[in-house]
Amino acid sequence: MRFLTVSGPPSSGKTSVILRVIEALQARQKKIGVVKFDCLLTDDDKRYADKGVLVKKGLSGALCPDHYFVSNIEACVAWGHENGCEYLISESAGLCNRCSPHINEITAVCVIDNLSGINTPRKIGPMLKSADIVVITKGDIVSQAEREVFASRVKQVNPGAIIMHVNGITGQGAFELTSLFEDASDIETLKGKTLRFSMPSALCSYCLGETRIGEEHQTGNIRKMDI
Amino acid sequence: MNHNDLFHRPFDSVLAEHPYIEDFLSSFGLEVEAEEDTLEQYLAGLNPDHLEDLGVSATQLRSSLDEFLAGMLAIQHPLDKVESLTIVGGHNKSGVAENLELTLKPGEVVCIVGPTGSGKSRLLADIEWVAQGYTPTGRKILINDQVPDSKWRFSTEHKLVAQLSQNMNFVMDLSAEEFIRMHAESRLIPDAEEKVRQILVQANELAGETFAPDTPVTSVSGGQSRALMIADMAILSKSPIALIDEIENAGIDRKKALELLVREEKIILMATHDPILALMGDRRLVIKNGGIAKIIESSSEERKNLQELEELDNKLLALRNRIRSGETLEII
């Protein structure tokens, strides 16, 4: 089973891009599974189900979304494998810019959009900087010059990645992205694999539900600003 | 020069000669004070805890910097010039062969005509991705009569195609001048200021109404923004192919715009249904059912009508200007 992690800032076009790739894979008679991670609510699982792919939805609720991801992804991969998926795609949003779901030896995709501003590539951490493939979306509505500047900014923070433009609406570029999916890592299990980068940690009183503000309520892993 | 040398030469002079190194480091949130003797020592001296806060490991930073420097040095060696682009026909959606081999040269204008959904986007994507028989159309694209290097496909610096379509807008909060400068800098163009000047002059010539260099790009008119995009594409974009999608309603001097792109030796592919633009093209590809159904060479009879069409167009343009300046049209 080929497995890929797809991540990217909220509303960057991850689901649309994946849907266009799914269409191209289905044209090649491939069986596909998708695991959609989100926080509070998502209807994207229905968009996937409408395409006739196997779909699993995980909502992290009150937990840190990427910690939730990493505690569940092994079981999700086993689920995809048991169900005979030839492709399994995990989709998760990077919400704090320091998180990243990418796993060593597993093809990592980051989806980022031209409208997010030219400083955004700098602001996103390992989710972008350690990805193997960076997909830039919404290129049809900004000028060519802005596309070029944006792509060069992405290149600056991740010079080793394959950077490509895909239009999630018309599907331009999706065929080519699909050919990269065909080269994705082929695995049966995530046993023994490691994350590409550690996740941000907290472990303080607020992790345990504290709501009161004030020095006397802060325990655990606390860091103070220089003011 | 081998980029590995940069790690061992005096740090302050390396930074001065290659300012993009500082830019690279600062894009990871690192501060650079050239206190260390070499770049190697600077990297070795970075605090791992600080790097972890920034979301990068020392190994990853080093390998990214390696790739970045190799890419930056490569960018300064120009690629082989694109002397020709050949489309080797595949088949349409029903599997009927296109039976054609079409070679385009710099300065040529080819129009693409056909209804929405007929396969224009697929043709443009085949070219952009230098298809090699594996796309749904089975077409092959050759550059300089050869199967091209894959760098044309995935490299951001060596994009084959620059695009302009009617839906494009400027979204950056910059003045026209700053905007072009930023584009020039991202391409490491040596004479950036001269390019900025040229582009502003050309854009003002193409736009009906002139605009000042300090006008924010987000507040120029539709025509001015198209004019700026075309001038920028002609003068600053390295891509040898210009793909233009329906600019008939752009409110710019279309003839001058095409002339500018031709002068800059672009291969121009233009999706259009505008008779003037179509006749200005050397050829028209008629797209039907996902395939190129026909190639029409603009005939001399058609070209004769071009003059008449242009007169009609100029007349309309004059009327538009009268409306703009508050006149009435009892007599036209």
Image (cartoon, rainbow, N blue to C red):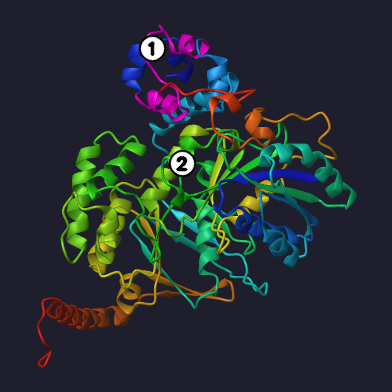
x 75%, y 63%: residue: A49
Circle 2 residue: A120
In terms of depth relative to the viewer, which is nearer, A17 or B229?
A17
Q: Is residue B82 visible?
A: no
Residue B119 screen position, x and y as percent: 55, 70
Q: Is residue B229 left or right of residue A134?
A: left
Which range is magenta?
B19-44
Amino acid under disc 1 = Phe
In terms of depth relative to the viewer, which is nearer, B188 or B225?
B225
| Chain letter of the residue carrying label 2 | A
x 39%, y 18%: residue: B32
Looking at the image, the residue that sits furthest to the bottom is: B330
| Chain letter of the residue carrying label 1 | B
Q: Is residue B260 left or right of residue A182?
A: left
Up the image or down, B111 lies above or below B21; here it is below
Q: Is residue A166 visible?
A: yes
Q: Rounded to the nearest whole Å, what is the CA distance between mark 1 and mark 2?
A: 28 Å
Q: Is residue B177 left or right of residue B96?
A: left
Amino acid under disc 2 = Thr
Up the image or down, A6 lies above or below A222; here it is below
x 34%, y 12%: residue: B12
Instruction: Using the image, tell me which numbered label, if any, was put on residue A168.
Output: none
Residue A115 screen position, x and y as percent: 44, 52
In terms of depth relative to the viewer, which is nearer, A140 or B256?
A140
Q: Is residue B25 left or right of residue B95?
A: left
Circle 1 residue: B11
The kind of secondary structure element at disc 1 is: helix
Residue B88 screen position, x and y as percent: 56, 61
Question: Toward which corner of the image does residue A169 lie, by quadrant?
Answer: bottom right
Residue B306 in magenta stretch? no
